[in-house]
Image: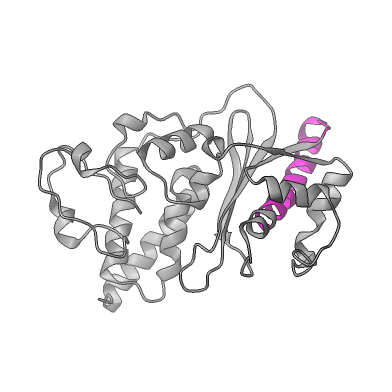
Amino acid sequence: MRLDSALTKVYQELVGALLYLSTSTRPDITYAVGRLTRFVAAPTEEHLAAEKVVLRYLKGRADFGLCFTSKCELHGYCDADCAADRDTRRSTSAMVYLYGGAAIAWSTKLQPSVAASTTEGEYIAAAVGAKEGMWLQRVRHFLTAGTGSVPLWCDSQSALALMHNPVTSARTKHIDVFHHPVREHVADRTLTVHFVRSTDQTADVLATPLGTVAFGRGIQGLGMPSDAQSSPRGGVLEQSHAEAGSRDYLPPPPDGAGLSSAAQHLPDAAPARVKY
């Protein structure tokens, strides 16, 4: 059911506040907030409930933030969730760069075109990450006079092969030239691309909804120390019914957008997890 004009304004104001927070110091909510922004024009009760889930998560982690160290090494991760959008079937690109042990630049957004394969989706995500990496390389050189290539980690072997081999074939000729500069950066060694296992892919927390353990591991990779077993109530996490305790919890709506309205008023003991 769609919200009335007053609640729609509240939803839009909260999304704006969450956007400011997710782009400043809280990359752990970037994916959830990105999903909420897609419905600001005509939000429903389910979207408002999902927004409350994110707010509850933030309340439980009010003192949570990025922790920097003296390890000044610039490196990045890129990932893609192929055909994630159910309406347009576009993939979601995600990238994050770390310096001093924590994230300094991150983003997640829908790709401008439909990727015909997971290879193409990962390749486009790598192209976005490469452009950000080149800009950060110039900033690093200006501030510290540091030189050297920027490592970029990707969990797709086929996309890495496509970056190293600039040959156009029938399977790749449709990829827009807008995404091909990543090949030039790899060829002139200003950017080095490496393979990383999906379980160690830090950018995965920005591209896909994850379970409790994987989410905790992902935000640790962002430079945000976390204990996955003691994570607070939040819609960006999930927990099985057995783990949640013996209370009779109400399930989320069928589309997985968030908790039902009745579930918003449950007691705070034994927090439940829902997959956002």
Extreme residue toward the front, this view: 170
Tally of marks: 0
Q: For this view, does 66 lie left or right of residue 70? A: left
- Queried whether the magenta region covers residue 125, the answer comes back as yes
Q: Is residue 273 left or right of residue 166?
A: left
Tell me the chief SS of the magenta region: helix
Q: Residue at x 43, y 48 (%)?
A: 29
Q: Quadrant of the C terminus?
A: bottom left
Which coloring applies here? one colour
**Front-most of 179 and 117?**
117
Q: Position of residue 25 (x, y in %)?
A: 50, 42
- Residue at 56% x, 67% y: name it: 90
Query: Which quadrant of the structure image shows residue 272?
Result: top left
Between 108 and 119, the residue placed more toward the observer is 119
Image x and y of residue 164, in percent: 81, 47
Expressed as whole percent of the image width and height from the top left, the position of residue 233 reads 27, 42
Pinpoint residue 68: horizontal percent, then vertical percent.
Answer: 56, 28
| Quadrant in the rendering for residue 6 | bottom left
| Residue that extends furthest to the right in the rendered view of this protein | 188
- Decide if residue 247 is on the left or right side of residue 184: left
Q: Which residues are magenta?
A: 124-148
**In-image side of 67 versus 141 (left or right):** left
112, 168: nearer the viewer: 168
Question: Could you tell me which residue is drawn at 56 percent across and 62 percent down?
Answer: 91
Nearest the camera: 34 or 205? 205
Q: Is residue 239 above or below residue 81?
A: above
Residue depicted at 12% across the width and 44% down the height: 267
Does residue 222 show up magenta in the picture? no
Tell me the quarter of the image containing the N terminus: bottom left
Q: Quadrant of residue 195?
A: top right
